[in-house]
Image: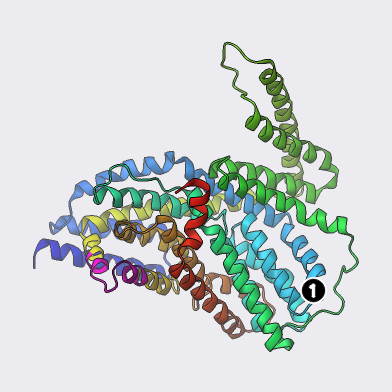
């Protein structure tokens, strides 16, 4: 047996070993980095691995630390945790239940709608599922909803944060696909490849995300028609007499925040990192306003300051490093300075308010924990992918995918099937960092749209939260569900929604324009 074949066998053993250790529950970052170093060292000793591959690690780590795009990860996490802690979800669920609870299946539709809003404003699956499980599941059970349908609705709508932008999955996928697409284009001789950005993925995921929401709602409506007892109407819902002003007070601020963050990214006004920073400030202001109405004046002044800065920077040239400054630009710069003062005043007041109400410290701690986990996994996955490539594992994957019957479609089907099965046992972050860097450059050489590929992966990874036995959304809900709801109820309740996820994947596979039309319309890419 030659050294090439021995190295390839070793790469497959490394992959299987890493997956086995992850299933057993070992820490992801340590498992990926440790497996890479152990098998890399063994490969050096038997002469099938070149140590020079590991010399690329320092530059990769520096690249991660200097990558401005990845700064969006802790900012989006901070934004999501802040909104979750400030009881925005609780108010939204109560209000939507008031509006639609009186119709058959209306409470279920309300939960899906709120899940969509929370996905677009928080993007944190665990927080969304737990929050809706605590708040809406008891109300749905009291209303006579089937435990299976109720738990299925909550789990499925709680995972929408994986696909509806701004999503941490899309941020990480965008960074990985950017490198994979460059590598693929260089391999086929294109030395000036079109860039793939997170903004493209955000735009590409927008319509498929809404499509999934529509499919979820359609299933609830169908259940209301064929099995009325599974989702009955509520004759009288608590808070039914709420005024329109109170309803708008709950719905409008989160909607404005979502529009500001997502709209600024898709319209090209701001980068994902800049929009994440604005979203973090907006979430902080909303949290202060919800927790202490006395701080409303300061929060409103900060909101006016942000709006003023956006308008002024869009209309006027605020640069002061010029020899001649027109009077209009000078006046605009002075007003912008006043807006900054108003924003700073509101921000300081909000920080004091949320700290006094014991919100800030838990938010900062959760943000640090999640962000540290993501970046540690990214660094460990860098070791794993370098050793896997150095042992020749990439050639095995390339040969398998290129020789699949059906060409590009067959190769894509195989990769989607492997990811779907891995989702039964592994978290989405592990799959993104282990699988995508390996198969991405190979598939993108087959004249495949990177945006379509990324959105297909995102929807597939969303399914990993729903599939037994290790679907994280199922565990999140099991932890807060009452004893009357059995684990089997949750498992059976999620089956139709897993089927809907697969249907969504099939529709996107046969109609790639669902993901590619909007980026082309907005950016021509």
**Prevailing secondary structure class for the magenta stretch in the rendered image:** helix
Is residue 372 something that shows in the picture? no
Residue at image position (41%, 60%) is 453
- Judging depth in this view, the residue of 35 and 272 nearest the camera is 272
402 within the magenta span: yes
Is residue 511 something that shows in the picture? yes
Task: Specify how the rendered protein is coloured.
Answer: rainbow
Q: Quadrant of residue 115?
A: bottom right
SS category of the residue bearing label 1 = loop
Residue at image position (73%, 34%) is 305
Residue at image position (58%, 85%) is 488
Q: Which residue is mark 1?
A: 101
240 within the magenta span: no
Residue 512 lies left or right of residue 89; in this view the side is left
Mark 1 surroundings within 10 Å by alpha-carbon count, few (fewer than 14), some (14 through 19), many (20 or more): many
Question: Residue 403 at x, y = what percent?
Answer: 23, 70
Residue 475 lies left or right of residue 293; in this view the side is left
**418 versus 287 height, above or below:** below
Question: Residue 54 at x, y = what percent?
Answer: 25, 48
Number of disc labels: 1
Residue found at the very far top of the displayed protein = 323
Residue found at the very far left of the displayed protein = 1
- Judging depth in this view, the residue of 235 and 312 nearest the camera is 312
Question: Residue 345 at x, y = what percent?
Answer: 75, 33
Q: Which residues are magenta?
A: 399-414
**250 versus 484 height, above or below:** above
Residue 65 lies left or right of residue 244; in this view the side is left
Q: Quadrant of residue 236?
A: bottom right
């Amino acid at each position: 047996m030659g050294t090439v074949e021995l190295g390839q066998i070793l790469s497959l053993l490394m992959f299987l070993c890493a997956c086995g250790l992850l299933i057993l529950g070992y820490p992801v970052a340590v498992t990926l980095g440790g497996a890479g170093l152990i098998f890399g060292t063994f490969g050096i000793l038997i002469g099938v691995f070149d140590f020079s591959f590991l010399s690329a690690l320092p530059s990769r780590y520096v690249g991660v630390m200097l990558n401005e795009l990845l700064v969006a990860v802790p900012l989006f996490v901070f934004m999501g945790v802040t909104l979750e802690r400030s009881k925005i979800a609780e108010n939204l669920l109560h209000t939507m239940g008031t509006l639609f609870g009186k119709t058959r299946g209306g409470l279920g539709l309300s939960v899906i709608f709120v899940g969509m809003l929370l996905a677009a404003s928080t993007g944190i699956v665990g927080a969304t599922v737990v929050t809706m499980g605590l708040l809406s599941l008891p109300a749905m059970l009291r209303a006579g909803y089937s435990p299976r349908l109720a738990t299925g609705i909550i789990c499925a709508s709680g995972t929408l944060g994986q696909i509806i932008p701004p999503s941490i999955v899309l941020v990480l996928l965008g960074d990985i696909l950017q490198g994979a697409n460059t590598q693929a284009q260089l391999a086929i001789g294109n030395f000036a490849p079109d860039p793939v950005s997170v903004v493209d993925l955000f735009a590409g995921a927008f319509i498929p995300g809404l499509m999934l929401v529509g499919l979820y709602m359609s299933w609830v409506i169908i259940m209301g028609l064929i099995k009325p007892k599974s989702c009955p109407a509520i004759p009288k819902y608590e808070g039914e007499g709420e005024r329109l002003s109170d309803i708008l007070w709950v719905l409008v601020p989160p909607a404005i925040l979502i529009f500001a963050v997502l709209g600024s990214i898709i319209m090209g006004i701001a980068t994902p990192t800049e929009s994440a920073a604005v979203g973090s400030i907006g979430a902080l202001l909303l949290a202060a306003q919800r927790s202490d109405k006395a701080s409303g004046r300061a929060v409103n002044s900060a909101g006016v300051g942000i709006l003023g800065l956006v308008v002024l920077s869009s209309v006027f040239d605020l640069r002061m490093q010029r020899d001649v400054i027109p009077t209009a630009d000078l006046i605009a710069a002075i007003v912008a300075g006043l807006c900054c003062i108003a924003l700073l005043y509101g921000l300081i007041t909000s920080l004091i308010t949320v700290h006094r109400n014991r919100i800030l410290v838990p938010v900062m701690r959760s943000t640090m924990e999640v962000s540290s986990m993501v970046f540690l996994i990214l660094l460990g996955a860098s070791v794993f992918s370098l050793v896997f490539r150095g042992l020749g594992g990439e050639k095995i994957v390339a040969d398998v995918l290129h020789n699949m019957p059906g060409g590009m479609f067959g190769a894509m089907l195989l990769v989607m099937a492997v990811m779907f099965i891995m989702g039964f046992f592994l978290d989405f972050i592990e799959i993104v960092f282990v699988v995508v860097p390996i198969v991405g450059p190979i598939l993108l050489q087959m004249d495949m749209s990177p945006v379509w590929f990324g959105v297909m992966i995102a929807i597939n990874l969303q399914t990993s939260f729903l599939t037994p036995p290790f679907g994280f959304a199922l565990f999140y809900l099991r932890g807060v569900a009452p004893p009357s709801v059995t684990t089997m109820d949750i498992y059976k309740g999620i089956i139709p929604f897993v089927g809907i996820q697969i249907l969504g994947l099939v529709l996107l596979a046969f109609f790639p324009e669902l993901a590619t039309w909007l980026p082309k319309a907005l950016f021509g890419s």
